[in-house]
Amino acid sequence: MNLLYLFARFFKIGLFSVGGGYAILPFLFEMADNSGWLTREMVGNMLAVAQSLPGPIGANLSAYTGFHYAGVPAGFTAAIGLTAPSIIIIMIVARTLKAFKGSALVNSLFTGLRPAAAGLLSAACFGAITLSLWNAAAPVWYAYIRWKETLIFLLLFFLIFKFKKHPIIYIIAAGAVGVILKL
């Protein structure tokens, strides 16, 4: 895969992933299913790394994917390819929105995008949870569920709603537990 193909692939993802960084996960899962150089497990690991880094998750995921495939130039190319459609669309919309600010058609368009964004985010959430807690390649039926990860997930879920502390505390705690348990 050359850099132009990588740019075009992530440009398409950036063009159709409405709803933020998590919305690119279904596209990355599809890329993992159809390419030999990326697996669903790698997407899950990339998501874990991208969430703990500063910056937009989508840009982090795309840069990490490109870097994994072909190094630093591919990382930059993938990140630029992902963000270019947003920049272009925002520039066009900003220029034309003033003229159509009170238009019912424009308001309907933005209202119609909300369910699409909700669907993409729901698919990303389900995919991330399934990838983290389910092991489809397990040799025996009782190993299909990743028990350690599931217990950590349930414990963190409980702690978040019970104590309502700052999210960074839970991120650091989950990372420490993952390192200790070698997950």
Image: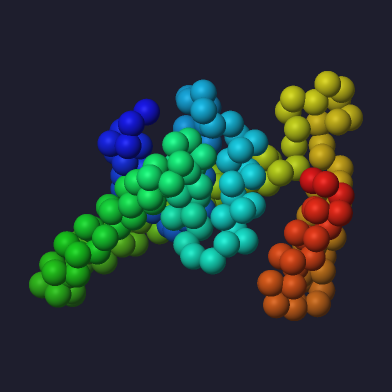
Q: In this orientation, does residue 142 appear?
A: yes
25 vs 166: above or below: above
Q: How many marks?
A: 0
Q: In this orientation, does residue 115 appear?
A: no
Task: Please identify the quarter of the rendering in which residue 2 is found.
Answer: top left
In percent of width and height, residue 115 lies at 43, 54
In percent of width and height, residue 51 lies at 59, 58
175 vs 127: above or below: below
User: For the point 71% across and 44% down, which residue is it?
Assistant: 132
User: For the point 49% across and 55% down, which residue is it?
Assistant: 60
User: Which residue is outermost to the front?
Assistant: 72
Q: Is residue 21 left or right of residue 88?
A: right
159 vs 77: above or below: below
Q: Is residue 182 left or right of residue 130?
A: right
Q: Is residue 166 left or right of residue 156?
A: left
In percent of width and height, residue 149 lies at 81, 48
User: For the point 71% across and 65% down, which residue is it?
Assistant: 171
